[in-house]
Amino acid sequence: MNTAKRFERILLATDGSDASQAAVDVTIAIAKSPTAKVRVAHVWNLEVHHHHGVWDVEMRNEAEKLVEVTVERLLKAGVIAEREIDRADSKHVAAAIALSAKGFQADLVVLGSRGLTDWQSMTQHSVSHELLCALDCPVLIAHGRPAGSPAKVSRIVLAIAGGDDLAPAARAATAVASPDASVMVVHVAQAIFGVQGFAYVESDDDIRETMARASELLIAAKVKVQGMVAHQGPVAKAVAEIAADWNADLIVVGSSRMGDISSLFLGSVSHDLLHMTDRPVLIAERIGS
């Protein structure tokens, strides 16, 4: 049985979209600690709802209703929840979410993928990019899934790469795993770029060592483990296909963040994954930033 530390303070950013509904579903699935608390945050766009210097009361009421409905869904599912409505223009949505997360001391931020544009562009400042750069805590991006969201997270794909700090990703995987969960560790065996800019390819021994380290971390948390090495083709595509074939509830990727010199590899994987999978993607905490 999984005995790992659970997420206790979850910020759920919502805009009422289908993706946001999926974000609510996955939040319910992972907020299993009896002491877990969820803060539902909605960022109200000033540019849309500000007219002739007068706040649009109707839109404000709509925002409050949206948050209230979300909070009620969480409470009915047995999750402790509270509400928050923030105001920001479109250029500062990520900053408002990050500020709310820090003020709440969130150990996880969950949001839907709708409106999180330019995931594939590492040069443009999208909401998602800015949020990942502004936060060190794990961030879970949910998609609207045709088959519906899981009631629990029992099948997790954990994508790892040699040279990456495995501990944050293992912690994130175990923190969302249900008691009977199984984790498929997928090693992305590709060229690794060193700090000096040179590339090298891991040996079979290196791969075995990385897989063993990841497995040890999960086994120590009493989580069942399987393993697979993705040798061929684009990494994100391989991980997405494995997750689909295995019918995974969620994908976890390492602690790399866009903008870190050493994180371009897994950073690009998480970018691409969000376009290639309909599963929720959990990007682990950043360490030593």
Image (spheres, helix red, strand yellow):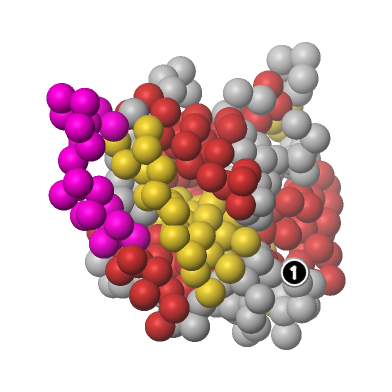
Q: Residue furthest front?
A: 54
- Residue to which mark 1 is pinned: 5
Judge whether 257 appears above or below 145 on screen: above
Above or below residue 62? Residue 126 is above
Residue found 23% across the figure and 37% down from its top: 55
Does residue 5 lie above or below 110 as drawn? Answer: below
Picture coordinates of residue 239, whole percent (x, y)? 50, 52
Residue type pointed to by label 1: Lys
Q: Is residue 49 magenta?
A: yes
Q: Is residue 97 left or right of residue 89?
A: right
Task: Residue 241: tell me if it is visible.
Answer: no
The residue at 68%/69% (across/down) is 6
Magenta range is: 46-67
Question: Which part of the image, by quadrant, shows the N terminus?
Answer: bottom right
Tell me where residue 100 sits by quadrant: top right
Pick the front one: 134 or 241: 134
Q: Residue at x 60, y 23 (%)?
A: 259
Q: Quadrant of the C terminus?
A: top right
Magenta span includes 13: no
Q: Main secondary structure of the magenta part?
A: helix
Residue 82 visible in the picture: yes
Q: Where is residue 146, by image quadrant? A: bottom left
Q: Residue at x 33, y 29 (%)?
A: 90
With 200 as the anchor, is 33 left or right in this view? left
Indicate the position of residue 26 as horizontal and vertical percent values.
45, 67
Between residue 62 and residue 140, name the one nearer to us: 62
Residue toward you, 242 or 71: 71
Residue 244 % position (x, y): 41, 63
Q: How many marks?
A: 1
Q: Give the side of residue 236 with respect to residue 159, left or right.
A: left
